Image (cartoon, rainbow, N blue to C red):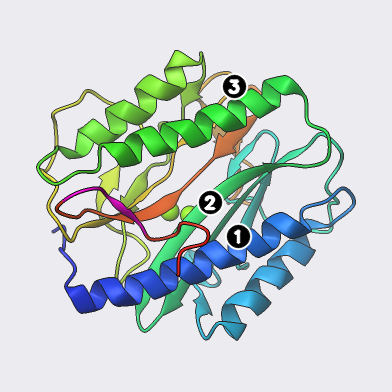
Amino acid sequence: MITCKSGKELIYMRDAGRIVAQTLAELAGAVKVGVPTLELDQLAEDYIVRAGAKPAFKGMYGFPYSICASINEEVVHGFPSLRKLKNGDIISIDTGAEINGYFGDSAVTLPVGDVDSEAMLLLKAAEESLFKGIEHAREGARLSDISNAVQTCAEGYGYSVVRDFVGHGIGGKLHEEPQVPNFGRPGRGPRLKAGMTLAIEPMINMGTYEVRTLSNNWTVATLDAKLSAHFEHTIAITGGKPEILTKAGKR
Ligand code: MG
Ligand code: MG
């Protein structure tokens, strides 16, 4: 069942979303050549806890960290580690927070130092595909209108859309119904209603959309070892424009 959130629930989700956005903004300032990703994890955890929230990922399905830190060909679910960021890397950081029983979830991919123009274009296209998806998250539209908008944008750049991992409903749980694929024909699936809250999260690959899971049984990487980018926002369907709950600078 896809739930529609009440006004009060949306207030809690705005709180969670704001904390996630602020955490990612804090981390963006800390992403630098030579920084180990474990340090970013600690920063995120401290920030979320100081804000009065809980790191949503830590312990979820047994995931041991507060952020996912996925470098270069890693798509999602990368483990923070002592590995230091190198000049020219791209890093996807995904994090979530829970406050008053409600969740926010957002991800961003950032360049480290000087990144080549091909990688920068991938980041631009992946973020743009997220916003194209969000534009279609409108009351009365169908769920797959979002999916199709993401895919059309990403493939328009010649990139591919990961099939094995998808976005999701979110609210009193981190993962709720429905699944929100980043690919598919428009005009399918449930009709969107005001109060539905979704985490839309395209994972866009430079080469093949196929992925593999690494030996830690968590980290997902591209099968061809080419770069991947991941952007995510938690949004609420309204009577008008969708509301981005994890937008930076939102109060
Ligand atoms: Mg996420
Ligand atoms: Mg998510």
Query: Mark 1 falls on what kind of element?
Result: helix
Q: Amino acid at mark 1?
A: Leu
Question: Which quadrant would the N terminus be assigned to in this image?
Answer: bottom left
Look at the image and say whether residue 151 sits in the magenta stretch: no
Query: Mark 2 falls on what kind of element?
Result: strand
Percent of width and height locating residue 248: 52, 58
**Residue 80 in sight here:** no
Which is nearer the N-term, disc 2 or disc 1? 1
Which is nearer the N-term, disc 3 or disc 2? 2
Q: Neighbour class for label 1 at 10 Å: few (<14), some, many (≥20)?
A: many
Does the numbered disc 2 mark a residue whose Cβ is under 8 Å from ligand 1?
yes
| Residue at the image position 48 percent from the left and 21 percent from the top | 160
Q: Please, is residue 40 above or below residue 116 in the view?
A: below
| Residue at the image position 22 percent from the left and 53 percent from the top | 237
Q: Neighbour class for label 2 at 10 Å: few (<14), some, many (≥20)?
A: many
**Which dot, 2 or 1, sits closer to the camera?**
1
Range shown magenta: 240-244
Question: Which quadrant would the C terminus be assigned to in this image?
Answer: bottom left
**What residue sits right under mark 1 in the picture?**
24
Q: Amino acid at mark 2?
A: Ala
Badges 2 and 1: C-beta atoms under 8 Å apart?
yes
Percent of width and height locating residue 203: 49, 36
- Compute the Cα span from label 3 to label 2: 18 Å
Percent of width and height locating residue 166: 38, 42
Q: Please, is residue 209 above or below residue 84 in the view?
A: above
**What residue sits right under mark 3 in the picture?**
206
- Compute the Cα span from label 2 to label 1: 8 Å
Q: Where residue 200 is drawn, which disc sits there?
A: none
Badges 3 and 1: C-beta atoms under 8 Å apart?
no
**What residue sits right under mark 2 in the picture?**
107
